[in-house]
Image (cartoon, helix red, strand yellow):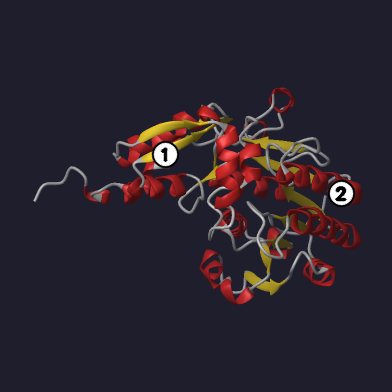
Amino acid sequence: MSARTNFERLITVYGGSGFLGRHIVRELAKRHYRIRVAVRRPDLAGHLQPLGRVGQIHAVQANLRHAPSVEAAARDADVLINLVGLLHEAGRQRFDAVHRFGAEQVALAASAHGARLVHVSAIGANENSPSHYARSKAQAEKLVVAAVPQAIIMRPSIVFGPEDHFFNRFGSMARFLPVLPLIGGGHTRFQPVFVGDVATAVADAVDGKAKGGSIYELGGPDVQTFKELMQFILKTIERNRLLVPLPFSIASMQAALLQYLPGAPLTPDQVELLKTDNVVSEGAKRDGRTLQGLGVAPDSIAAIVPSYLWRFRKTGQFRGRTA
């Protein structure tokens, strides 16, 4: 067992400036690791500096589509964490380039430098899925394990937190739209997981508490359908909106047009994803490859989401106050 302290260990976090990344960086900083954040635009990563001590967090340039930059960011690191992923394709950002090629470059860099590897994937990764996103995630996992057999793979469900792209998006939509669509009838099941719990799990893996060569599936304590989540959002923001079932066939046709709008509100690939439940598998629960198996008690949606979704109420946080 090495006598080195966390102060002497360097962790490289690829994609560390994003939603999940900033929470993982914060958790690693609390545990006194030195952190190198590898991002495409280091000049836009200044918001990470206050999360640690002076000199503890350092941003460097790296692009997963450029192998030499990935390798350079791995030098002298004890652990590499890959968080880079796409929700939808845009311009040069393609699933195969980022999820497959990029993930493989991080894994090859870990192998070349003798670093441990934590790779964040997604529940639903499946080589046989009709969704390109899900296929590319599964193919990335295979490439990662081929390069680093002891890599730890984390598969979170929908991740929620103050800056999330799920509850905030639908909360915002509900302010303006009188009707919200329930794609496929809203029957798809999800197991949303708090971003802080995912960050704890990843940091625990860095600490050596997770089993190498394993896939962990991270979900919260509640399993709810898409319809139930929409109802929860509307109740939380105190707005009455009509929830209308939308068949997958109609949703696919609409997505074929919506994918070209700024931010791609909906893509055909996302419609395909909604045809499959996004929950922790029975096998993962049986084998203890879950948050609970890592000793993490997951936070519920009800305990966290209202603390930031109030901003979509008509009167914001001042509901119920009298002059």
Mark 2 element type? helix
Query: Badge 1: how crowded within 10 Å, few (<14), some, or many (20+)?
Result: some
Find residue 107 and report its horizontal and vertical position in percent: 84, 55
- Tell me: 254 left or right of 209: left
Residue 255, relative to residue 231: is it above or below? below
The residue drawn where x is 61% and y is 35% is: 274
Type of amino acid at the residue the image marks with label 1: Leu
Find residue 76 and report its horizontal and vertical position in percent: 81, 68
Nearer the observer, 235 or 260:
260
Find residue 241 and report its horizontal and vertical position in percent: 33, 37
The residue drawn where x is 53% and y is 51% is: 265
- What mark, if any, has residue 180 been given in the picture? 1
Residue for badge 2 = 143
> Is residue 283 visible in the rendered structure shown here?
yes
Most distant residue in the left direction: 323
- Tell me: 259 left or right of 7: left
The residue drawn where x is 59% and y is 33% is: 248
On the image, which quarter does residue 306 sit in? Answer: top left
Residue 18, relative to residue 297: is it above or below? below
Name the N-terminal-most of marks 1 and 2.
2
- Tell me: 202 left or right of 307: right
Mark 1 element type? strand
Nearer the observer, 10 or 192:
192
